[in-house]
Image: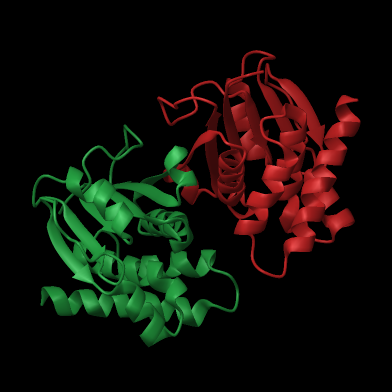
Chain colours: A red, B green
């Protein structure tokens, strides 16, 4: 079992990467782990890009930033073009939203591509919960935290009244991931 | 004008320090600055403590963590006891929620104490927006970002339907800060 996970979540401004990062980190805490969660807002943020980083560990976390991601989520073509080409080896899982990312060239990572936004729109009825579909898939693909901890953390952070949609989205992502790896 | 601000927001788990940190960082971006926002969840998080860090700069931000805070917000006695005693000089502004922190001993910082939670409960009608009262006060006391950028960032993050309460809380904090420093 891996002891420390470096996870990078990237997309465009409206795709909820910051919230996803917080939920993942708080899920890790509920699972008894340590976590550090960081957002960096630079000139890139004004261009509409959004990146959240989460480090999850059973032990102490020395450095709060991702150096070499174990998992990279890219939910937009711009995010893929910017971050996925930095990935050199199949040690890194690159999870791609194929609804938005159509050109998958230039990465050395191990690609898993799912239509996250399309799934959210068609099966949950709300494209905005694509970030939750992504989290469900990510957690199931990696085993970094138990799905139950992820759900509990999500319920504590999402707006009242949208619990059903969000849990549905998380489970949809998990299920899709199970289909991929089975 | 100061170029880089290191800001530490601390309180207990339910006091919204993570959301406050995100809003402050996103307000900085709207004001044309760079920002890094970090949450560290360790064993302390399971004890109910919550800490968010924000670094705001006109230039590049080299290191994402607060080394010596320019501003420390403490919204609980536990947070005050844990972080304020680390402050050695009056260069650090220690903003205290006097509703929850009654023993102010042991810090070398420059103290400003306001009944943030009481103000939120009595003047906005909702103790939960004490974090917004705190942000309004912090921004007005320091000038780190314009109040307009803070409001715009808050409106983008808070749940729909609670805009009025949150803006009222931000302005209440600003006004209280103006009374203190005038």
Q: Position of residue B162 (x, y in %)?
A: 54, 77
Q: Position of residue B149 (x, y in %)?
A: 38, 66
**What is the number of callouts on the image?**
0
Q: Is residue B6 visible?
A: no
Instruction: Say which of B93 and A48 sits in front.
Output: B93
- Give the quarter of the image for residue A90: top right
- Give the quarter of the image for residue B116: bottom left
Q: Is residue A44 visible?
A: yes
Report the residue at 72% width, 35% height from top.
A138
Instruction: Point out the image quarter for the C terminus of chain B.
Output: bottom left
Report the residue at 72% width, 29% height from top.
A143
Please, is residue A165 above or below residue B122 in the view? Answer: above
A110 vs A5, left or right, is right
Please, is residue B180 above or below residue A68 in the view? Answer: below
Instruction: Say which of A27 and B35 sits in front.
Output: A27
Q: Position of residue A177 (x, y in %)?
A: 83, 34
Q: Position of residue A172 (x, y in %)?
A: 84, 46
A132 vs B125, left or right, is right
Report the residue at 55% width, 33% height from top.
A33
A70 vs B20, left or right, is right
- Give the quarter of the image for residue A124: bottom right
Please, is residue B141 above or below residue A50 in the view? Answer: below
Instruction: Point out the image quarter for the N terminus of chain B.
Output: bottom left
Residue lying furthest top? A89
Report the residue at 87% width, 32% height from top.
A178
């Amino acid at each position: 079992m891996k002891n420390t996970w470096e996870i990078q979540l990237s997309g465009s401004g409206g795709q909820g990467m910051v919230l996803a990062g917080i939920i993942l980190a708080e899920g890790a805490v509920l699972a008894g782990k340590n976590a550090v969660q960081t957002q960096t807002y630079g000139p890139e943020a004004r261009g509409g890009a959004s990146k959240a980083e989460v480090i999850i560990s059973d032990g102490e976390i020395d450095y709060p930033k991702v150096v070499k991601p174990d998992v990279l989520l890219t939910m937009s073509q711009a995010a893929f073009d910017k971050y996925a080409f930095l990935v050199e080896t199949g040690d890194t899982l690159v999870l791609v939203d194929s609804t938005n990312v159509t050109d998958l060239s230039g990465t050395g990572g191990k690609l898993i591509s799912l239509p996250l936004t399309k799934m959210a729109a068609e099966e949950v009825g709300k494209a905005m919960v694509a970030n939750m579909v992504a989290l469900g898939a990510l957690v199931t693909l990696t085993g970094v935290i138990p799905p139950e901890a992820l759900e509990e953390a999500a319920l504590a952070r999402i707006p009242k009244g949208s619990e059903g949609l969000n849990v549905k989205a998380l489970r949809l992502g998990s299920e899709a991931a199970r289909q991929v790896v089975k």
